Image (cartoon, rainbow, N blue to C red):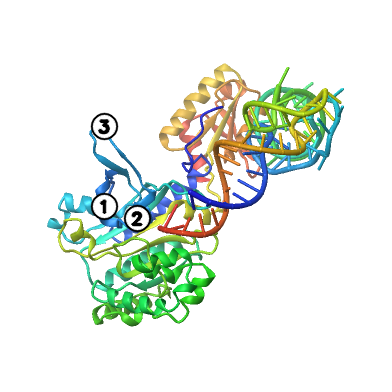
RNA sequence: GUGGAUAUGGUGAAGCGGUUAACACAUACGACUGUGACUCGUACAUACGUGGGUUCAAAUCCCACUAUCCACCCCA
């Protein structure tokens, strides 16, 4: 039995990878319009980093991390998400000293030990964004607008943006208590998981899919009614700015995020097209995280999107590359000429193909067609003698004579 | 961690106990006699996820295992 890849770890093959490159290229282009810079962070971090940032009691930390001890007996973890690493780097290199406002994006693999299913893998890829140092709602609105802009640029109507506010350490505990007392009388209706979470994380019951919990939470108080004056003001100003620039959104006051560090604005890009995995991108504000990790008291906001999930939404699009020219040759002498021409043209910037071995003209034409080459140049003994050769436009089926020089051919091929 | 479904060539698949494992696509070569896409021809699974068992006989029945997919959970 041949060796296969590890469960939940996938190869991205030619044919599929072009779509990934398109997504990544678009992200870079759009994010840089908004002033962000790329940051590259390691895949391995000290385990403690994720316990501190994501939260000890979350599923990610409790049971989904790829953690092990390296040969120096250090406890390390393959990163399950990017925010913690970026903030660690931000603090470690004191980026805030030059400018408290850092605007960063990253892309790369993340690792979570979960059962794979549609849109969920053990090695998956995220493109993420982190902005630090701004409390004002202008940055919330900008991040959301940029995210919408990105999806619009990909040509996707789906997914749609949902937003909520989780309040701050001042008002969230008040809401939590209000929700608990509401839930208390209905405890019996809740599913086992939510009963268990009643103490640890009662907010979870709000987005539980079990019928009992949906029924039990009907008429539950909304976080939005419990926001303190500052949080309420922040949220309405954020909405106002989104309205001002025409970024479409819906308020979902039952949206809860899985990571402990979120405060105030949280959001998700959701779709109905991915089965159980509705979130294509998600994030929020994390005003306490940087200080929690030992850095200065600076606010932050960010999001991450799942590249596999975006790629799934882009299913129908065609990304195949096609060569500018295929050179067919007959005989060894023509092969040399063809090889020289091909190399000269590639050095000029044209994508050119030819067979590696001597084949029949028929066979070469078939290969040219298979590559979907835009032109085919045919070189034989006659052409060598006369110094020109037929250049065939494959789509039109027409052909004309061109001089056997890289300049002349380049001219023809690139003008079409 | 829990449930369910499925496992035949590069792909989609037929086959439902009996002896060469359909068919289509893809691929390779060739014919139409220096030109592709159409047409035609030839080649392409000693093999039916793995290991056992039942039987004179198994891809077809039974058992175990493994893998994949989907859902729960969780999340991007």
Q: Nearer the viewer's eye, disc 1 or disc 3?
A: 3
Near mark 3 (Cα within 10 A), the count class, few <14, some 14-19 or many ≥20, is few
Q: In terms of secondary structure, where does tag 1 sit?
A: helix
Mark 1 and mark 2 on one chain: yes
Q: Dot 2 surroundings within 10 Å: few (below 14), some, or many (20 or more)?
A: many
Residue A359 vertical placement versus A13 (above, below): above
Q: Chain of mark 3?
A: A
Would residue A274 be found to the left or right of residue A103 on screen? right
**Which of the two labelled residues, at mark 3 and mark 2, occupies the earlier sequence position?**
3
Residue placed under numbered mark 1 in the picture = A86
Asked if badge 1 and badge 3 are on a common chain, one would say: yes
Tag 1 and tag 2, C-beta contact below 8 Å: yes
Position of residue A118 in the picture relative to residue A82 (left or right): right
Q: Indicate the quadrant containing the N terminus of chain A: top left, top right, bottom left or bottom right.
A: top right
Q: Quadrant of residue A143?
A: bottom left
Residue farthest to the left, as pictured = A97
Residue A207 position, x and y percent, is: 45, 69
* A255, A313: nearer the viewer: A255
C-alpha separation, residue under disc 3 versus residue under disc 2: 31 Å
**Contact? badges 3 and 2 (CB < 8 Å):** no
**Which residue extends farthest top?**
A332
Sequence-first disc among 1 and 3: 3
The residue indicated by pointer 3 is A71
**Place of residue A365 in the rendered image (x, y in percent of width and height, measured from the top left):** 64, 32
| Residue ID for mark 2 | A128
Q: Nearer the viewer, residue A204 or A307?
A: A204
What secondary structure is marked by label 3? loop
Q: Distance of mark 1 from mark 3, alpha carbons?
A: 25 Å
Q: CA distance from mark 1 to mark 2?
A: 10 Å
């Amino acid at each position: 039995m041949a060796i296969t890849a590890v469960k939940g770890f996938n190869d991205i093959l030619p044919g599929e990878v072009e779509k990934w490159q398109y997504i990544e290229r678009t992200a870079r282009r759009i994010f840089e319009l908004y002033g962000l810079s790329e940051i590259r962070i390691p895949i391995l971090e000290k385990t403690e980093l994720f316990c501190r940032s994501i939260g000890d009691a979350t599923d990610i930390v409790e049971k989904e991390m790829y953690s092990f001890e390296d040969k120096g007996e250090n406890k390390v973890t393959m990163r399950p998400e990017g925010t913690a690493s970026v903030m660690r780097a931000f603090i470690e290199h004191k980026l805030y000293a030059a400018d408290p406002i850092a605007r960063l994006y990253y892309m790369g693999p993340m690792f979570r030990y979960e059962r794979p299913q549609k849109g969920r893998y053990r090695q998956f890829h995220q493109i993420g964004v982190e902005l630090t140092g701004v409390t004002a709602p202008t940055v919330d609105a900008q991040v959301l607008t940029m995210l919408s802009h990105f999806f619009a640029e990909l040509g996707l109507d789906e997914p749609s943006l949902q937003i909520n506010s989780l309040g701050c350490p001042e008002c969230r505990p008040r809401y939590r208590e209000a929700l608990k007392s509401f839930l208390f009388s209905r405890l019996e209706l809740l599913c086992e998981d939510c009963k268990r979470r009643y103490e640890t994380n009662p907010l979870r019951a709000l987005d539980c899919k079990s019928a009992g919990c949906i029924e039990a939470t009907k008429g539950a108080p909304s976080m939005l009614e419990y926001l303190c004056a500052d949080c309420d003001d922040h949220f309405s100003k954020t909405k106002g700015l989104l309205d001002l620039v025409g970024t479409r959104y819906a308020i979902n006051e039952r949206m809860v995020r899985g990571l402990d560090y979120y405060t105030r604005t949280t959001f998700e890009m959701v779709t109905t097209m991915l089965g159980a995995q509705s979130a294509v991108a998600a994030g929020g504000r994390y005003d306490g995280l940087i200080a929690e990790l030992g850095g200065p008291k600076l606010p932050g906001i960010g999001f991450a999107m799942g590249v596999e999930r975006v790629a799934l939404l882009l299913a129908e699009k065609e990304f195949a590359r096609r060569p500018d020219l295929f050179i067919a040759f007959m005989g060894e002498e023509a092969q040399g000429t063809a090889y020289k021409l091909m190399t000269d043209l590639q050095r000029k910037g044209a994508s050119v193909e030819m067979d590696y071995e001597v084949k029949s003209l028929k066979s070469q034409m078939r290969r040219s067609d298979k590559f979907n080459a835009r032109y085919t140049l045919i070189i034989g003994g006659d052409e060598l003698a006369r110094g020109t050769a037929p250049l065939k436009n494959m789509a039109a089926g027409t052909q004309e004579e061109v001089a056997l020089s890289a300049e002349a051919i380049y001219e023809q091929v690139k003008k079409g």
